[in-house]
């Protein structure tokens, strides 16, 4: 690659890069001449999936280890000089009613989906602040915007990702750094496989009509989801190339429909309860 070409290419830092969306992100970035710091618990799996390439640095990162994240950033900056795009992609799902989900199961999910994202982001941001540029992209879920029965704890972890991203977008904007949360609907990946989805050990019969039905749906929907992962990965390239990226980017027609449905519900409920909601102000408050 020529010096001029290399100066124009982006440097990505991608977690959960050994399979699924992560592998697609790495492959597409490399194919167009970008360079990638690709991380996973087993970095050899990344090399096996992508091939050993000059623009690829595969690094071991368990996102629950802040030390791993800091070391990966150090290696990445030493190799490529900068980090332009952070994609917090690592995560997994938990399927079960809120009551069925043990505290240990919930903590483990939050350790990866929330605190893992925080650890990696905190490791990368000092470099982006020095550059006064960069784009933090957090992979959430449609379930992080609109809750589903059976996905309460997983959705709560993604709701946390949404809130953190929204705050970061405000904090980082004056520094020239963007923050976006991506909200995929159901895509035809291995997310519903047992290597990406944990079923709660406890199942309670009273939830058969709701969570039990969701378990049946998830089993039947596996590898029949409407979303095309290749198209999502292509959309990510458009996102990172945007001069004015959005705070939120839903992907998939099911995500768009669900968001619109929730907005209508929230507006209707607010209208129904508005008088009571506004009645709690002091009498001298002018609205």
Image (tube, helix red, strand yellow):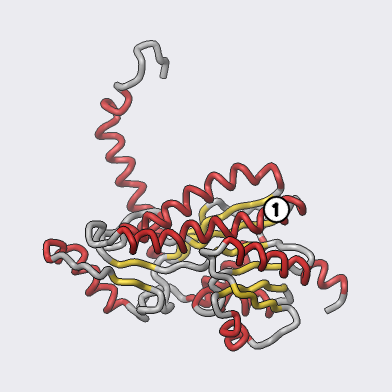
Side of 208 relative to 85 (left or right): left
Establish if 35 lies above or below 158.
below
Please give the name of the residue rendered at 41% of the width and 52% of the height, measured from the top-left corner.
Answer: 159
Q: Position of residue 178 (x, y in %)?
A: 64, 52
Badge 1 element: helix
Graded by Cα atoms within 10 Å as few (under 14), some (14 to 19) or many (20 or more), the crowding at tag 1 reads: few
Classify 136 as above or below 15.
above
Q: Among all residues in the image, which is located at the extreme right?
A: 3
Residue that extends furthest to the left in the rendered view of this protein: 206
Q: Quadrant of the N terminus?
A: bottom right
Of residues 245 and 90, which is closer to you in this image?
A: 90
Where residue 45 appears, x then y in whole percent? 56, 84
Q: Quadrant of the C terminus?
A: top left
Look at 26% across and 26% down and name the residue there: 276
**Residue underneath mark 1:** 126
Residue 218 image point, x, y percent: 29, 73
Q: Quadrant of residue 158?
A: bottom left
């Amino acid at each position: 690659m020529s010096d001029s070409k290399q100066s124009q290419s982006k440097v990505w830092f991608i977690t959960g890069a050994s399979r699924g969306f992560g592998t697609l992100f790495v492959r597409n970035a490399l194919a167009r001449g970008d360079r990638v710091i690709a991380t996973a618990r087993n970095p050899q799996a990344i090399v096996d999936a992508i091939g050993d390439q000059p623009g690829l640095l595969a690094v071991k990162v368990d996102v629950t280890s802040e030390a791993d994240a800091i070391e990966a950033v150090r290696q990445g900056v030493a190799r490529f000089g900068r980090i332009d795009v952070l994609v917090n992609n690592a995560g997994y799902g938990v399927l079960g009613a809120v009551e069925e989900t043990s505290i240990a199961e919930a903590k483990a999910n939050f350790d990866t989906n929330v605190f893992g994202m925080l650890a990696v982001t905190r490791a990368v941001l000092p470099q982006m602040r020095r550059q006064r540029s960069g784009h933090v992209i957090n992979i959430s879920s449609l379930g992080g915007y609109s809750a589903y029965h059976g996905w309460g704890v997983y959705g709560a972890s993604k709701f946390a990702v949404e809130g953190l991203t929204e705050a970061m977008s405000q904090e980082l904007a004056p520094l020239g750094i963007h923050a976006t949360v991506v909200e995929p609907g159901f895509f035809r990946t291995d997310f519903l496989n047992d290597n990406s989805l944990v079923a709660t050990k406890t199942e309670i019969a009273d939830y058969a009509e709701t969570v039990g039905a969701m378990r049946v749906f998830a089993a039947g929907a596996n590898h029949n989801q409407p979303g095309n992962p290749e198209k999502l990965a292509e959309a990510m390239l458009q996102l990172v190339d945007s001069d004015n990226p959005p705070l939120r980017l839903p992907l998939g027609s099911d995500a768009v429909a669900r968001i619109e449905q929730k907005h209508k519900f929230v507006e209707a409920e607010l209208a129904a309860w508005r008088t009571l909601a506004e009645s709690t102000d002091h009498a001298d408050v002018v609205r």
